[in-house]
């Protein structure tokens, strides 16, 4: 902070300049000022985040006091009667995210294995670049494709699923296009890039010797990958899945556009549903009355808490594997 | 026996490796499908009117989204003015002064902020600004997006500053420069290309955000002068037009979607290749 050179340059003009200027110059130490500015900005981030938590907490007081924990387990959502229960939305968020993971995990981990283990570095980099571009596509655009391309396509495909797997309760009932199933498919498109790019990095962090040892013992390329490299990177891959899950839970626009927006709990994936983020997006501007608004903010608080916990777990897992690889 | 076993293993090997390749192609195929479809659908409906005319009432054909294009520009400008300075300066703190316990708190909180769903950020801006001012405004939308920009602005600044060799800092210090002068005239200029690219990526990311604007900036069928009125933005227009039952609005939504996606992807390609070329340059040195 106080380099000797600076002290000297500070002292030099003392003879000529008035006392006030010297006092000023001492008080306005460049390094102190610079530190003050950047430190203030760092503090303001912490303050801002605390303010966010505070605002969510305070603005959901009415609803928290009136319904308590039962908010999370009751399924009546009736703004006119002033009864608010979040269960249909929590259920919808959970089911769409689970379905998205079910579709995205095999696809994402498979592609990550290809990019990390098989593809030549140049091709792998180019393909990863494209996958990262896919991650940059705004969610409202994915929703647009969802409404006008995916839903009509599903309307043609679903009858085949129903004729073969229709006996399962998850594929029962009529299909109108907008449904929990469509939302899950749309979400899986949005989270696949995350699983691929992070799993690839985790796989690349696995020490080379392990692969060489397996190959030297006569394992095929696939055996060395599946039985040696992937188990070593397992924690990190799970971390990438958690990260994708956190994103899926909070995803709003694409889901809102194809889920059907009906607050019900149905066993069938083909029925319309609702998600936490979607109900906030749809009803926030029309929330009349403080209790209604408070209930919606509380939904935001639930979403916030969920994503924080899952993100934290994900970072921990990814950190554990990459640290293990570099050891 | 032996050969049959090894044949089976070879077959499994080939099949599984081919499957992973298919997974990759499928994922990349989705990107090209989205790109191609929007180019086809949106490119057809994009016209000069789109940029110069206001939206027309239901039933009339034609019209554009001039107000939404300008509104998006205004809100993004505001978001940049809020998010970039805070994120950048805090990033300088973490990279140049950050070896304290507090700096790990800042890093943790930034990660936390980065993980918050965008719709929750919208609620934050709503309770903070819209509830207090009693009306929707471009300002509230700008704040919501600005806060969303902070974590990435901080991360990219810190990362690129850290990549500047310590020897540069030492050289400047040895010449008698105080630390702040070293940072401002030597370290930051050395990393500026990477930082600027990071900021562009950051801007492209929030440019497509819709959820935080739904109940902060709301929307508007007309021009919204100043910062205190409900303001139309391109992503929100895409959403409202796409879920409406009018084919004419759907055409507008496709055109707007094409515009938005083209902008986001162009910025992404430009910024990412700048970063990549900077890295290969560094590797050669």
Image (tube, rainbow, N blue to C red):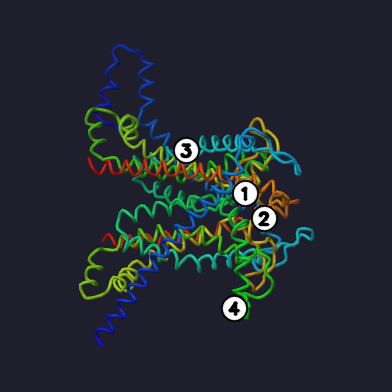
Labels 4, 3: front one: 4
| Residue A104 vs residue B83, the one in the foreground | A104
Q: Which residue is mark 4?
A: A165
Query: Tag 4, which secondary structure?
Result: helix
Q: Which residue is mark 1?
A: B123
How far separated are the C-alphas under marks 4 and 1? 41 Å
Residue A199 sits above or below residue B265 on the image: below
How far separated are the C-alphas under marks 3 and 2? 30 Å
Residue B122: x %, y % from top left: 60, 47
Pick out the residue farthest to the bottom. B1
Q: Is residue B172 left or right of residue B247?
A: left
Q: How many marks?
A: 4
- Do the numbered discs 4 and 3 sit on residues whose CB atoms are within 8 Å? no
How far separated are the C-alphas under marks 2 and 1? 9 Å
- Do the numbered discs 2 and 1 sit on residues whose CB atoms are within 8 Å? yes
| Residue A318 vs residue A3, the one in the foreground | A318
Labels 3, 2: front one: 3
Q: Please determine if labels 2 and 1 lie on a single subunit.
A: no
Q: Please determine if labels 3 and 1 lie on a single subunit.
A: yes
Labels 2, 4: front one: 4
How far separated are the C-alphas under marks 3 and 1? 21 Å
Q: Which residue is mark 2?
A: A296
Residue B67 quadrant = top right
Q: Which residue is mark 3?
A: B84
């Amino acid at each position: 902070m106080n380099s000797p050179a600076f002290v000297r340059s500070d002292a030099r003009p003392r003879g000529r300049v008035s006392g006030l200027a010297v006092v000023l110059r001492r008080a306005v130490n460049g390094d102190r000022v610079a530190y003050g500015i950047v430190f203030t900005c760092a503090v303001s981030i912490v303050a801002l985040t605390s303010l966010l938590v505070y605002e969510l907490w305070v603005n959901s007081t009415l609803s928290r006091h009136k319904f308590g924990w039962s908010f999370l387990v009751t399924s009546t959502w009736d703004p006119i009667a002033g009864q608010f229960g979040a269960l249909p939305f929590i259920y919808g968020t959970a089911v769409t995210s689970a379905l998205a993971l079910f579709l995205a995990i095999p696809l994402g981990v498979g592609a990550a294995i290809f990019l990390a283990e098989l593809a030549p570095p140049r091709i792998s980099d180019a393909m990863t670049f494209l996958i990262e571009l896919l991650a940059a596509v705004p969610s409202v655009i994915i929703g647009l494709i969802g409404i006008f391309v995916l839903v009509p396509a599903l309307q043609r495909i679903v009858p085949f699923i129903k004729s073969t797997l229709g006996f399962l309760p998850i594929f029962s009932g009529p299909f109108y296009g907008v449904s929990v199933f469509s939302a899950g498919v749309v979400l899986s498109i949005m989270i696949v890039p995350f699983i691929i790019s992070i799993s690839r990095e985790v796989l690349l962090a696995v020490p080379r010797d392990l692969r060489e040892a397996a190959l030297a013992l006569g394992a095929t390329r696939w055996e060395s990958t599946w039985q040696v490299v992937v188990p070593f990177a397992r924690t990190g891959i799970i971390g990438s899945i958690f990260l994708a899950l956190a994103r899926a839970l909070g995803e709003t626009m694409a889901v809102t556009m194809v889920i059907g927006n009906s607050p019900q709990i149905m066993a069938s994936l083909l029925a319309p549903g609702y998600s936490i983020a979607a109900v906030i997006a749809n009803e926030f501007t029309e929330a009349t009355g403080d209790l209604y608004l408070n209930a919606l903010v509380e939904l935001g608080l639930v979403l916030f808490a969920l994503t924080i916990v899952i993100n934290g777990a994900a970072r921990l897992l990814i950190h554990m594997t990459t640290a293990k690889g570099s050891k | 026996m032996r050969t049959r076993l090894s044949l089976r293993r070879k077959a499994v090997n080939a099949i599984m490796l081919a499957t992973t390749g298919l997974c990759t192609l499928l994922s990349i195929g989705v990107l090209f499908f989205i790109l191609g479809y929007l180019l086809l659908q949106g490119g057809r409906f994009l016209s000069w009117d789109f940029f110069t005319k206001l939206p027309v009432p239901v039933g009339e054909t034609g019209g554009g989204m001039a107000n939404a294009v300008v509104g998006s520009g205004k809100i993004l400008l505001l978001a940049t003015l809020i998010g970039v300075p805070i994120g950048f300066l805090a990033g300088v703190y973490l990279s140049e002064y950050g070896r304290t316990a507090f700096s790990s708190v800042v890093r943790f909180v930034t990660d936390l902020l980065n993980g918050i769903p965008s719709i929750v950020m919208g609620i934050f801006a709503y309770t903070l600004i819209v509830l207090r001012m009693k009306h929707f405004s471009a300002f509230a939308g700008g704040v919501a997006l600005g806060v969303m920009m902070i974590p990435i602005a901080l991360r990219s600044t810190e990362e690129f500053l850290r990549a500047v060799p310590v020897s540069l800092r030492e050289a400047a210090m040895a010449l008698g420069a105080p630390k702040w002068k070293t940072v401002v005239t030597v370290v930051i200029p050395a990393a500026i290309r990477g930082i600027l690219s990071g900021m562009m990526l950051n801007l492209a990311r929030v440019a497509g955000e819709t959820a935080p604007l739904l109940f902060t900036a709301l929307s508007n069928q007309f021009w919204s002068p100043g910062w205190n009125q409900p303001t139309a933005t391109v992503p929100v227009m895409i959403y409202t037009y796409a879920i409406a039952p009018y084919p004419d609005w759907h055409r507008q939504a496709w055109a707007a979607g094409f515009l938005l996606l083209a902008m986001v992807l162009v910025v992404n390609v430009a910024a990412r290749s700048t970063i990549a070329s900077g890295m290969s340059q560094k590797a050669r040195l």
